[in-house]
DNA sequence: CGCTTAATTGATCAGGGTCAATCGTGGTGG
DNA sequence: CCACCACGATTGACCCTGATCAATTAAGCG
């Protein structure tokens, strides 16, 4: 119910060729890296599912991962998008409440919790890293709550663009890895509302949409005001 | 800008008399307790503010704390309510984004991060506890996002009641420590909508409101269905 | 080149927000 | 002791944002 992907050997050439990926492996403390296994998942591949045992966690090397929950009536809520360098999959309890899926092709490193815990007992820096990653997840989750709570559609979409802009290579140009549906499920909106907000921003000269996945920020100040 | 409260000596009698409070102090690992300082805050007292340095964290001994953010236009979003035994106040970065206030009178223990970090380097169990607390905060924040994302007003209020029921002494009877405004700001609703949902539940025989702060759950199955 | 799926656009509807009036309760002081 | 006040909560009437339903356009892809 868990594995989704193709091969799973140690640090493939393909991953190391990619600069971002290389950076991501480097910033993990050396002993932690030893405990990990590289996995590749294809478009839409399931990394873990609701109900799985949370005995693994993961680090994104390349690609984007969505962590989400399906409600019993079919609605989907996306809790977070994770990009290169981020760690995800920490959960309390013995059954996961969330599931994780690859958006496009992804390369990840998976860590066995028990192994890392043992490492952590001996190695202070592993400990520090683990805590840091958990805190990053916490910060993300908190700012996501804030975003969903008391904000209008335009505010949500603007905030999302600004947030995503941080993960983009070239300044002012973002490549949306995810569909409108993904964005909608992340923001608690519908695809129609997301689309309307974007075209509204375009009409006002705040952004330009070269394609539906490629956004150029023309007036970041205006965008920040919209994000309120 | 941070301190809100009256005295701050070591483990006052008053706190130890209270059974819940006693439990809460006991479950902290022994060496961690040494590093803490007891503080008491009155109704509405500020524990920390936005912009403060996050060099402290806190454990609730008795009372309820709300952690929240004020938006620039005056709207308020409550991120979490914390009750006896819970730890709060972890934040990344060097300025807090959130603030914390006492709901009613509270007794807390405050810990200096630096001191605890030093302890944690020597003592594995302190480490474990810290991580556990961070994870609890993460789990709370995630389930809060889920609650805010794609749910109707009735679903939100029902979920809130069920969640709060876990912190209540007698089974099926809950004492709401917070105002309707607090509940509304936690759920991303207005006081009017919260009120309407509650009276609707009462009309349908799901709950009874002996007073506006005291809720008796008459049909918990129905409530769970409402929470969807 | 057509098929399939994603995205945009428009028209209508409803859930929840806003504004306003009333009720209830607890505290205070005459 | 009770009248009064202040504040929180409830209730009602109306409105607006964003959801829903439906049609069209655009973009991949075999």
Image (tube, coloured by chain):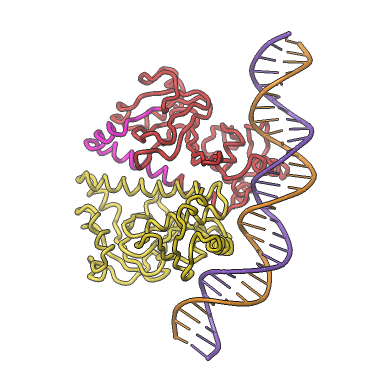
Chain colours: A yellow, B red, C purple, D orange
**Looking at the picture, does residue B50 appear above or below residue A80?**
above
Q: Is residue B135 rendered magenta in the image?
A: yes
Q: Is residue A2 at all visible to an observer of this figure?
A: yes
Evaluate whether residue A74 shows in this view: no
* Residue occupying image coordinates x 36% and y 48%: A136
Q: Where is residue A186 shown, x and y percent of the image?
A: 49, 57
- Compared with B173, A61 (above or below) is below
User: In x, y percent, where is residue A130?
Assistant: 29, 48
Of residues B202 and A88, the one drawn nearer to the viewer in this rendering: A88
Left or right: where B104 falls relative to B87: right
Q: Which residues are magenta?
A: B109-138
Image quarter in which the N terminus of chain B is found:
top left
- Please state which of residues D21 and A197 is positioned toward the viewer in this rendering: A197
Percent coordinates x, y for residue A122 in the rendering: 19, 45
- Judge by depth and name the residue closer to the eye, A116 or C9: C9
Residue under the point 48% across and 34% down: B83
**x, y percentage for residue A182?**
49, 63
Number of marks in picture: 0
Say whether residue B64 is magenta. Answer: no
Task: Give the residue at x 35% y 69%.
Answer: A5
Assign the magenta stretch its main secondary structure. helix
């Amino acid at each position: 119910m868990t594995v989704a992907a193709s091969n799973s050997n140690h640090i493939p050439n393909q991953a190391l060729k990619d600069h971002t990926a290389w950076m991501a492996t480097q910033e993990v403390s050396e002993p932690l890296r030893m405990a990990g296994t590289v996995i590749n998942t294809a478009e839409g591949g399931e990394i873990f599912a609701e109900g799985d045992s949370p005995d693994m966690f993961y680090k994104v090397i390349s690609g984007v991962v969505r962590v989400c929950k399906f409600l019993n009536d079919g609605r989907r809520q996306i809790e977070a998008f994770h990009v290169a360098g981020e760690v995800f999959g920490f959960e309390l309890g013995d059954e996961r409440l969330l599931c994780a899926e690859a958006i496009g092709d992804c390369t990840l490193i998976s860590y066995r919790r028990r192994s890392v815990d043992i490492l952590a007992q001996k190695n202070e820096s592993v400990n520090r890293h683990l805590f840091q990653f958990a805190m990053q997840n916490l910060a993300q989750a908190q700012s996501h709550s804030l975003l969903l709570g008391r904000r209008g559609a335009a505010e949500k979409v603007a905030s999302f663009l600004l947030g995503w802009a941080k993960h983009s290579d070239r300044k002012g140009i973002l490549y949306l890895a995810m569909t409108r549906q993904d964005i909608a499920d992340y923001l608690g909106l519908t695809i129609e509302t997301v689309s309307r907000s974007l075209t509204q921003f375009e009409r006002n000269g705040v952004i330009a949409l070269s394609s539906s996945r490629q956004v150029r920020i023309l007036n970041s100040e205006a965008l920040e005001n919209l994000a309120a």
